[in-house]
Amino acid sequence: MSQIIKTEAVVIKKLDQGDSSKIVTLYSADYGKFTVIAKGIKSPKSKMNARLELFNVVEVVVYNKSSRAIQLVSGADIVKVHNSITSDLDRYQYSMAVIELYNVLLPEHEKNDKLHQALVRILYLLDTSVNEALFLFVKFFWFFVNEIGYGIEINKCPHCHKSLSDSQGLFYSYSEGSLCSDCSEGHLINFDMSKELFNLVNCLSKKNEQCNYTKQDLEFLVFFLEKHIAFHVDGFRNLKSLKIF
């Protein structure tokens, strides 16, 4: 069975296909992550090449056939272009890391309106916000990890149920999760966070744009979250986008 569908989506990946076409991965509220082929897009006369650029929010028209894994896109109109992202190296790097998370960690055709809204929002912020790109990314990364089901408990120790805010810091074990300072004794601890770093984690998990941090703190949290995901997801090692530049 075939049908024509129209949906608003974010362009999260592009690959060359032969001499004239490209394979494009999109993320939409209606269909989650899905892949289309844009035939003839490399032609100088094609308008779709510029429209189907990474990070663009577009309204696409897709010829959908259930027997095909890759659908045919027949049209695309621009909804939003993020010009500052592509003209600033830091913003570009962390925007690439955002879409890498969607490409690597999300399955095809799984709808999640919250993740779609979050993707649109973080790209908008990376394009327009005066906040540091690394800070915006870490805040988003923490949200994303929680939303896909690999969240890290930061409220109570799973052993004694003591509030972690009363602890001297947060002690993290791959196998045990977050532990308070008392329960950390006798366990293999993979990471330990100072009280100051724990307070930053608490701040990042809330809708607070005024967090106290250093660049070193934020870079450590990216590394920490990468290792946390790598332990839980086979095949994931780190975010390649952050290793390129």
Image: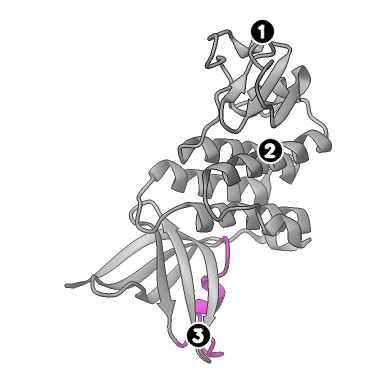
Seen in the picture, residue 15 relative to 217 is either above or below; the reply is below
Question: What SS does tag 2 mark?
Answer: helix
**In the image, residue 108 lies at what x, y percent?**
39, 59
Query: Residue at the location (52% across, 51% down)?
Result: 234
Front position among marks 2 and 3: 2
Query: Residue at the location (39% across, 75% down)?
Result: 75
Mark 2 Cα shell of 10 Å, populated few (<14), some (14-19), many (≥20): some
**In the image, residue 98 lies at what x, y percent?**
60, 52
Q: Name the residue beneath numbered marker 3.
A: 46
Question: What SS does tag 3 mark?
Answer: loop
Q: Name the residue beneath numbered marker 1.
A: 166
Query: Residue at the location (65% across, 27% down)?
Result: 172
Front position among marks 1 and 3: 1
Q: Is residue 136 visible?
A: no
Display coloring: one colour
Three-letter code for the amino acid on which mark 2 is drawn:
Phe
Magenta segment, which residues? 40-55
Mark 3 Cα shell of 10 Å, populated few (<14), some (14-19), many (≥20): few
Instruction: Assign the N terminus to one quadrant of the image.
Output: bottom left
Three-letter code for the amino acid on which mark 1 is drawn:
Asp
Q: Is residue 228 visible?
A: yes
Q: CA distance from mark 2 to mark 3?
A: 43 Å
- The majority secondary structure of the magenta stretch comes to loop
Q: Name the residue beneath numbered marker 2.
A: 224
Does residue 23 appear left or right of residue 53 in this picture? left
Front one among 50 and 98: 98
Seen in the picture, residue 234 relative to 17 is either above or below; the reply is above
Instruction: Assign the C terminus to one quadrant of the image.
Output: bottom right
Front one among 155 and 135: 155
